[in-house]
Image (cartoon, rainbow, N blue to C red):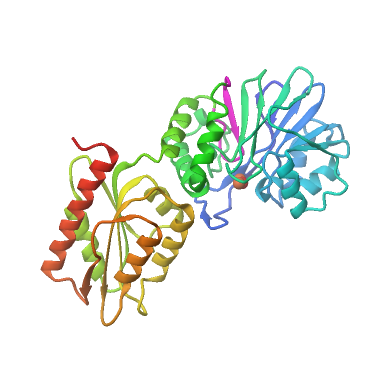
Amino acid sequence: MHVPLREGIDWVGYVDWTVRDFHSYNTERGTTYNAYLIRDEQTALIDTVKEPFGNDLLANVSALVDPAKVDWVVCNHAEPDHSGVLPQILAAMPNATLVCNAKCLLALSKHFDTAGWKTKIVAPGDVLSLGKRTLEFINTPMAHWPESMFTYIRQEKILFSMDAFGQHCATTERFDDENCIGTVLEEARTYYANILMPYGTSTAKAMASVTDLEIEMIATSHGVIWRSHIPQILDAYRQWTSGKYQPKIIILYDTMWESTAAMARAFEEGAAHPGVHVKVIHVRRNSLTTIAADVFDAAAVAIGSATLNGTMMPQLGAAFCYLEGLKPTAKAAVGFGSYGWGRGSAEAIQEGLERLKWNVLRAPIKAQYKPTPEILEECRAAGALLARKALDMSGAAG
Ligand code: FEO
């Protein structure tokens, strides 16, 4: 299968309908690994796909050109979902030279035996002429890995943006305007939260490096190609990378015998306020992937757990571990939990909030076995405090 972007420029990647776990990212809608073939006086393949889909990529290329006639294979990013089939592809394209930056070649050499590969190292601003068109290379370190790079075709106003602006979303249609744009933007947001959030500053720099370029298409490495909604995705990335808070409270909890659930509901009641969005998330009923997407731009968070074996329940521990790595902007936060005897979950949650360096507004609220009416009222008051903070932090107070 191949899909034209322009005359002589085709998508030749792979649609992965069945993947549901992408290194712990819950890919409910599958994904795509996008590769692009440019046929000019010389022929270039931009990016490849994940193993074991090399034969699919080669079939797509072969429908357009003899692989032996491919002159260049550009590697914008060394992560294996885009480079895993490079040994197979370069063997099938014996006249091709691999084009990448120096950091990329170093990373590839750790993954593969690159000794026999023909390579061309490019530096920022380098231009490779294919004939009527040129490829320009823009280093975008840490968006997503140190070697990450964009490739730009000035004559076509197409930016090949690697992971940036991507979405884990398998579809038959390759362009944004052929799909439900709400779904595409939701998946782009989930992708940003789970993949690029720790590198928000680097991603903002990557965007700044292309602000002067005329762009009519953003050909990402995952999901649909942007051509009709470019302002929306750029605006969304500007907001996501800014660290700006939304007037939103996340109440994240786990429960054993419904005591902590009752406390979570009391937080929800107290947080109810015009202009404040409140979302209650049972940590075992939602994936870490969607939790990260919900938490990342929230101004305030309440986190609670029943006590299990003297600490918080394990899936909440996993959520803390994941959030510590993703490093969302600091939230206003309150911990809560129930316990039976001895040290409990509330203390472990407090320690977790401190590790996250969030602004913990008060001591955790604790209930022994069952929350009393007084403790539930304390939860409501803490919810109201979080609502006021959320309005202040997001600039929505007024
Ligand atoms: Fe899709 Fe960072 O790889």
Residue 88 at x, y = what percent?
80, 48
At 56% from the left edge and 43% from the top edge, which residue is drawn?
A: 170
Taking the magenta stretch, the answer to whether it contains residue 72 is: no
User: Is residue 39 found left or right of 271 in the rendered image?
Assistant: right
Taking the magenta stretch, the answer to whether it contains residue 221 is: yes
Does the image show residue 114?
Answer: yes
At 38% from the left edge and 56% from the top edge, which residue is drawn?
A: 357
**Above or below, comparing residue 306 to residue 288 in the picture:** below
At 68% from the left edge and 49% from the top edge, which residue is drawn?
A: 50
For this rendering, which residue is in front, 231 or 37?
Answer: 231
Q: Please tell me whether the stretch drawn in magenta is mainly helix, strand or loop.
A: loop
Q: Which residues are magenta?
A: 213-226
Query: In which quarter of the view is residue 281 placed?
Result: bottom left
**Above or below, comparing residue 267 to residue 165 in the picture:** below
For this rendering, which residue is in front, 204 or 152?
Answer: 204
Q: Residue furthest left?
A: 374
Q: Residue furthest bottom?
A: 341
Does the image show residue 85?
Answer: no
**Above or below, comparing residue 211 to residue 223 in the picture:** above
Residue 129 at x, y = what percent?
78, 22
Residue 6 at x, y = what percent?
66, 22
At 37% from the left edge and 71% from the top edge, which residue is drawn?
A: 313
**Above or below, comparing residue 5 to residue 204 in the picture:** above
For this rendering, which residue is in front, 287 or 355?
Answer: 355
Query: In which quarter of the view is residue 238 placed?
Result: top left
Query: In the rendered view of the protein, which quadrant contains the C terminus?
Result: top left
